């Protein structure tokens, strides 16, 4: 078993210490590698048998180069499990999960909000209190474990009653309250506070103002925590919040007594008598001082019953058991998961909405345990008949002669393929592969993507009987918009709307790229840029946007068009007349080349006459752009009028111009943020894959 451990940290504290101890313990039993940012305080403390990978990209979780670097590393390492620690690392890997075959386990170390842990397949909480903050059925509570050292040397403190408090010098640790409370004590004492942090100056000032310079010491960072605990009369935890509370366990191992606010693991192991409120610490300390023997006996009894469960050896074994359980479930899923054959003439390196849909759906299905293959056409002579790309088996066929025979050639290829490999489901995208399809013993799913279907319906005539014949073949009829489900005749297949999706993290706005591209495009700071990533064909309505420029009042707006097609020259001519020097035509670009241009833009426009759940629109939303779009197909599914954009009538240049001006007059930045939130909640590809699998399962019953 190979496990890649990842913590996104540049500092040192309790979480980092637990990470170090876990990794150093695991490597004695399993293969462990560690992923760290280049500026970290952990690597020097790790076992030399652990291979360390240091990231060179900036640690900003919105940095696309960071994702590319991590993705490449994971593919090279090929771990069975990626184990992330804390929210930042977990969120980064979550967005890459669909591209890897590794299982993802995330550890949550505090009870604060962290919705990302509700989405990850397997989650560890370090306490029951932390577990309450997670809504995930695959949740396991594993307490942090600590190494235990026998015969810890004690230190010589003053003969007065010695208090000890340990933690990062941060507001959340409540040290300011603790210092104020000890000023009320009516017996000789000394308080040592161990740790460093941004509150040091404020705490030093407080100590001086209260005249406690001879009674309270800030010891800074120390390596001898067990010795300090063993040498103190009472350990005090004054925190407002703790995920686990390492000091609690260290005091169980080495201390005489402890009192604590109700935080972290204390809630699960301490008797009520050892708790204190934030502003009642002095009263509780006075009580312990006057009844030391009773409290020491109580704590000694607690140590006998609860110490063993927090030993590092037990923690390590529980992690290994959980890893094995997760890996075993994955093997079971791999063994029984469905084998899916996607059939599509559109697949990378070709570009377009159907291409993006088939690729991303295939990747997402793979990531949730399905075995996915794709049958597609050759697009250049250098391609192979069979190869595995991004974990998907690709089978390619050659199409010869005239279009009428393509369906026959595809069916002949598929019949041969299904004899060589078992498939539970065949899922066809686009009409051409349906034409001569006659494989009877494998359930057929069809996704009705194309606007070609809407054109055929509109033209009617002989096309309707042809469509009836084609649609009689699938057992499940899917569509990425309600409009594409509206068929003017009945047929046997179950009809289901399942949206297109998007990988939101790929389109996160990058300010450096934005500045660079806007300079290259000669876009001034006070100008607004609208992006259209659309082929210039009839159904996309780009010519109506060109006509709308005659009525746009905002003189700071510029238009960026990426795409070409049969209407390119018409659109260019209209723009030259109505919007001279305020438009940019970049022509066709590969999908990966388009992504950066979203960062340079301020809004996106969808003037379509026919549309599914627009992938172009989803990408713009993922890039935090508001939308203006027509009331057709799946566009109203994307645009909440007045929330993340505005809807307009199709084929109406004046209404389109009015809605563009209205958007720019309002808080379009907030609308863009609403777009991002909406896309993350409703259009994640993993969720769409799960919906698709549920429909597959119903079909196989």
Image: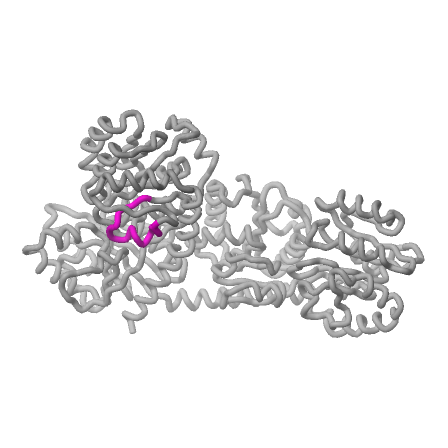
Task: Determine if residue 592 is in view.
Answer: no
Residue 54 placement, left or right of 561: right
Q: Position of residue 461 (x, y in %)?
A: 6, 55
Give 253 or 381, whichever is nearer the viewer.
253
Give 164 or 355, whichever is nearer the viewer.
164
Q: Residue at x 21, y 30 (%)?
A: 574
Q: Residue at x 42, y 42 (%)?
A: 667
Q: Position of residue 130 (x, y in %)?
A: 60, 63
Magenta span: 628-641
Query: Is 401 rendered above or below residue 259?
Result: above
Q: Position of residue 504 (x, y in %)?
A: 41, 49
Give 372 or 16, whichever is nearer the viewer.
16
Query: Is 110 rendered above or below residue 352?
Result: below
Q: Position of residue 689 (x, y in %)?
A: 36, 59
Q: Residue at x 76, y 60 (%)?
A: 279
Q: Is 354 colored magenta in this rendering?
A: no
């Amino acid at each position: 078993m190979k496990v890649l451990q990842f913590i996104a940290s540049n500092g040192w504290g309790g979480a980092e210490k637990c990470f170090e101890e876990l990794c150093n313990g695991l490597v004695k039993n399993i293969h462990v590698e560690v992923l760290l940012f280049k500026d970290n305080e952990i690597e020097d403390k790790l076992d030399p048998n652990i291979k360390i990978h240091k990231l060179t990209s900036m640690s900003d979780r919105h940095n696309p180069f960071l994702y590319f670097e991590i993705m490449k590393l994971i593919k090279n390492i090929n771990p069975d499990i990626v184990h992330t620690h804390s929210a930042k690392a977990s969120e980064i890997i979550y967005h890459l999960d669909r591209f890897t075959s590794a299982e993802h386990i995330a550890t949550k170390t505090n009870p604060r909000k962290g919705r990302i842990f509700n989405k990850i397949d397997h989650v560890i909480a370090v306490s029951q209190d932390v577990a309450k903050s997670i809504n995930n059925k695959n949740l396991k509570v594993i307490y942090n474990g600590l190494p235990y050292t026998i015969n810890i040397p004690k230190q010589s403190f003053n003969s007065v009653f010695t208090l000890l408090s340990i933690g990062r010098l941060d507001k959340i640790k409540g040290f300011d309250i603790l210092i104020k409370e000890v000023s009320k004590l009516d017996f000789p004492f000394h308080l040592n506070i161990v740790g460093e942090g941004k509150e040091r100056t404020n705490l030093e000032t407080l100590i001086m103002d209260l005249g406690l310079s001879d009674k309270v010491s800030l010891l800074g960072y120390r390596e001898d925590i067990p010795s300090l605990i063993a040498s103190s009369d009472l350990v005090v935890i004054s925190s407002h919040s703790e995920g686990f509370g390492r000091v609690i366990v260290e005091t169980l191992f080495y201390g005489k007594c402890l009192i604590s606010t109700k935080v972290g693991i204390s809630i699960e192991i301490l008797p009520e008598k050892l708790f204190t409120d934030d502003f009642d610490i002095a009263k509780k300390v006075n009580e312990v001082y006057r009844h030391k023997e009773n409290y020491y006996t109580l704590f000694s009894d607690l140590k006998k019953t609860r110490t063993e469960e927090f030993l590092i050896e037990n923690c390590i074994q529980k992690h290994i058991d959980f890893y094995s359980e997760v890996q075993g479930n994955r093997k079971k899923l791999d063994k029984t998961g469905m084998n899916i054959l996607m059939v599509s003439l559109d697949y990378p390196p070709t570009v377009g909405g159907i291409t993006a849909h088939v690729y991303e759906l295939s990747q997402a299905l793979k990531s949730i345990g399905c075995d996915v293959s794709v049958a597609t056409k050759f697009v250049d002579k250098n391609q192979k008949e069979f190869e595995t790309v991004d974990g998907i088996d690709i089978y390619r066929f050659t199409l010869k002669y005239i279009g009428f025979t393509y369906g026959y050639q595809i069916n002949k290829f598929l019949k041969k393929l299904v004899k060589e490999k078992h498939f539970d489901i065949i899922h066809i995208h686009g009409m051409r592969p349906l034409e001569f399809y006659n494989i009877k013993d494998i359930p057929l799913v069809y996704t009705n993507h194309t606007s070609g279907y809407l054109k055929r319906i509109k033209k009617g005539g002989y096309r309707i009987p042809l469509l009836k014949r084609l649609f009689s073949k699938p057992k499940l009829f899917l569509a990425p918009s309600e409009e594409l489900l509206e068929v003017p005749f009945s047929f046997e297949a179950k009809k289901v709307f399942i949206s297109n999706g998007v990988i939101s993290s790929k389109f996160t706005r990058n300010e450096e790229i934005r500045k660079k591209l806007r300079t290259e495009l000669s876009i001034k700071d006070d100008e607004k840029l609208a992006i259209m990533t659309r082929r210039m064909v009839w159904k996309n309505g780009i010519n109506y946007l060109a006509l709308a420029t005659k009525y746009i009042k905002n003189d700071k707006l510029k238009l960026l068009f990426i795409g070409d097609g049969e209407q390119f020259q018409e659109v260019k001519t209209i723009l030259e007349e109505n919007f001279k020097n305020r438009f940019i035509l970049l022509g066709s670009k590969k999908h990966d080349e388009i992504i950066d241009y979203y960062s340079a833009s301020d809004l996106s426009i969808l003037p379509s006459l026919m549309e599914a759940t627009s992938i172009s629109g989803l990408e713009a939303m993922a890039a935090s752009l508001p939308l203006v779009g027509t009331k057709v197909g799946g566009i109203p599914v994307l645009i909440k009028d007045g929330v993340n954009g505005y809807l307009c009538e199709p084929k109406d240049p004046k209404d389109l111009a009015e809605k563009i001006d209205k958007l720019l007059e309002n808080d379009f930045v907030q609308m863009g943020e609403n777009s991002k939130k909406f896309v993350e909640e409703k259009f994640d590809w993993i969720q769409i894959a799960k919906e698709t699998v549920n429909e597959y399962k119903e079909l196989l019953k």
